[in-house]
Image (cartoon, grey):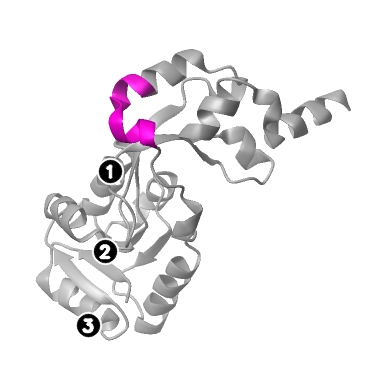
Amino acid sequence: MPKILVVHHDAGARQLLAAMLNGRYEVCQARSYLEGIQVMAAQRPALIVAGQDARRQDAILLLQYLRQRGYRANVVVLAGRGGGVYQQVAMNLGAKAFLEYPVDEQRFQQTVSSVLGSLEPEASIPPLTAEEETANLTELEKKLNRQMKCFAGKNLVFLQSFIGSGTRSRPRICLKCPLRKEFGLNRDVYYEFIRDVCCADPSACEAVQAFRARQAG
């Protein structure tokens, strides 16, 4: 059963949202984005539902925290009074959906189900390599950025952590490639691909091949 974290400063709203989800999902709750961060680390939910209004900006603060630390998490924002103006900001920060609160129960459940159904299977994420297990990852990140040969990956290697049901929360080497995304490929590449392709032989990457073919006309 997928685990969902509800972050909302209002106890009544938290309980109502939890009641809409109970029976289909395992629900945990937090009163603020700071408490939500602690619950995320302990519970590793598959989805986070976060409240946002003009007075309490828990959803935006949470999304900023996740973005700054390279965490991969799935957030649905519920906008209360005055919160609608934050829709574009929230989506730019990686929110999966933006709804207005109070929300119709059927629409809320459909949105949650749709977001969970669109998640990439965990099997697509490779396990940590032996080198990542033993290396100083901060130094390894800097080394790969220095060695980067692909024009599309310049200074884009970073340490990524995962917050999700069944996934690792330990940091790892990652690169989100804008060129791969442009050509419809998975933009997330990991240590061995970065080391062997991005930093050694970019011509082996199918996105670079497609780019060069397009440039050649």
Which of the numbered marks, if any, corresponds to residue 19?
3
Q: Going by the image, does 205 lie left or right of 214?
A: left
Image location (x, y in percent) of residue 185: 64, 45
User: Marks 1 and 2, how far apart in space?
Assistant: 34 Å
Q: Earlier in the sequence, mark 3 or mark 2?
A: 3
Which of the numbered marks, if any, corresponds to residue 170?
1
Identify the image quadrant of residue 122. Answer: bottom left
88 within the magenta span: no
Mark 1, mark 2: which one is toward the viewer?
Answer: 1
User: Marks 3 and 1, how far apart in space?
Assistant: 32 Å
Residue shown at 31% from the left, 26% from the top: 135
Total count of labels: 3
Give the residue type that dot 1 points to: Arg
Give the residue type that dot 3 points to: Ala
The range drawn in magenta is 130-140
- On screen, residue 150 above or below 194: above
Give the residue type that dot 2 points to: Gly
Specify the quadrant that holds the C terminus.
Answer: top right
Image location (x, y in percent) of residue 108: 37, 76
Residue shown at 58% from the left, 46% from the top: 186
Q: Nearer the viewer, residue 86 or 185?
A: 185
Residue shown at 47% from the left, 26% from the top: 156
Q: Residues within 10 Å of mark 1 (few under 14, many from 20)?
A: few
Q: Earlier in the sequence, mark 1 or mark 2?
A: 2
Q: Earlier in the sequence, mark 3 or mark 1?
A: 3
